[in-house]
Amino acid sequence: MNINKHYLELEDSYLFSTIAKKVNEYAQKNPSADIIRLGIGDVTLPLAPIVVEAIKKAADEMGKQETFKGYGPEQGYAFLREAIQKYYLRKNVSVEADEIFISDGAKSDLGNILDIFSLDNTVLVPDPVYPVYVDTNIMAGRKIIYADANDSNGFLPLPDDKIKCDIIYICSPNNPTGAVYTKDGLKKWVDYALKNDSVILFDAAYECFIKSEDLPNSIYEIEGAKKCAIEFCSLSKTAGFTGTRCGYTVVPKELVKQNAVLNKFWVRRQTTKFNGVPYIVQKAAEAVFSEEGQKQIKKNIQYYSENAKIISDTMDKLNIWYTGGKHSPYIWLKCPNNMTSWEFFDFLLEKAAIVGTPGSGFGKNGEGYFRLTSFGNKERTIEAMERFTKLINK
Ligand code: PLP
């Protein structure tokens, strides 16, 4: 018996546990402190009414003999795949319903997709990054190289022809930096992937925050992308499904590598190792894509976007360099006075009772940066920014 030794190579993630520990210690020492949390990556607004109605109706169906459902199709029910297909069409992207796979969220699929790729592929991951891309590849034992994201490229690294890689992760709008690729930027990656026979894993979990027609919501807005890219999306941030769990992955049939149609590989992988998302959840997701559902979820997205604007306006006023905010729920700021990420974390907590996330927790290039999120309450965000302004102006 041999264990998978690659698990021993994983670095313990101390980021959120250290934050929790520091905040607890602070709260114990300052019991009357009114702590505002701008560190959370989870949503706070409840599900839209139309989604709740759909869940209740689906639950009733499950309780009646005539409408009860057992195992569903592993790839998702046609009603949801077709609803998502229409959602893509509104963005002028045409994908076939059987290129769309329903899952319990983007995180699972981002990890599971690696099943269809060889272990000897080299993986390119931006730094700083959503840690799942790194850890899933370490677990499998793949070689990882990093693309530096920093203030000189606006945290949007572009391909380097001298560096060869097989699997490329791109997240736009980005977590943690909130930076968004333009079509030109994404085209450079698509061209690189086509030229080097690489596959792009495009994480569009935050696409609903994009407010400009000129910025791409999907990598398939770029010509040639269907030949080199798989796209992951989620209802977590779009419609508050972090606890309800539903996402989708697009594997185009045009994506053919070494004569293998990767869509077929993914069908085989899912039908072998996955038994589908609950009918009730798929009905809830279908409601999100209805006309009324889109109206209702946009209200929530708008609410978070207003919080993001409150934060980014404050950074503008204080002349603090940042990315994100406009097309993203994240604001990624340069720590004032050359503080390190953790120094700024302590400073903000101790002097203003505000909690954010130290950028260094997302990779070495995150050192000296800090992430604030807009998923909180509006009044509390305003209060936090008043305290922030007073503190920096002191
Ligand atoms: N991708 C990115 C970049 C994320 O930040 C997150 C969640 O925070 C996910 C994927 C995971 O989404 P899901 O809840 O659908 O698993």
Image (cartoon, rainbow, N blue to C red):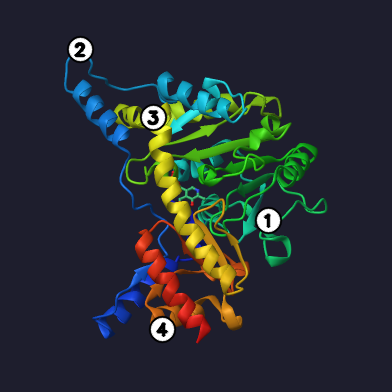
The first of marks 1 and 3 along the sequence is 1
Disc 1 residue type?
Leu
| Nearer mark to the viewer, of 1 and 4 | 4
| Residues at marks 1 and 4 touching, judged by CB atoms closer than 8 Å | no
Residue annotated with mark 2: 66
**Residue denoted by label 4:** 351
Mark 1 and mark 4: Cα distance apart in space: 32 Å
Tell me which label, 1 or 4, sits earlier in the chain. Answer: 1
Q: CA distance from mark 1 to mark 3?
A: 35 Å
Mark whose residue sits in front, 1 or 2: 1
Sequence-earlier tag: 2 or 3:
2
Residue visible at 51% across and 28% down? Answer: 87
Q: Secondary structure at mark 2?
A: loop
Q: Is residue 49 left or right of residue 106?
A: left
Q: Does residue 263 sit above or below 151 in this rendering? A: above
Q: What type is the residue that disc 2 sits on?
A: Glu
Of residues 44 and 7, the one drawn nearer to the viewer in this rendering: 44
**Between marks 1 and 3 in the image, the one whose residue lies nearer the viewer:** 3
**Image coords of residue 114 (percent x, y):** 55, 41
Q: Amino acid at mark 3?
A: Glu
Number of numbered discs on residues? 4
Q: Position of residue 151 (x, y in %)?
A: 69, 66
Camera-side residue of 274 and 32 = 32
The residue carrying mark 1 is 156
Question: Ligand 1 near label 1 (Cβ, under 8 Å)?
Answer: no
Q: Distance of mark 2 from mark 3, alpha carbons?
A: 28 Å
Label 1 crowd bin: few (<14), some (14–19), many (20+), radius 10 Å = many
Q: Is residue 69 above or below residue 136?
A: above
Front disc: 2 or 4:
4
Label disc, if present, on residue 292 of the rendered structure: 3
Nearer mark to the viewer, of 2 and 3: 3
- SS for tag 4? helix
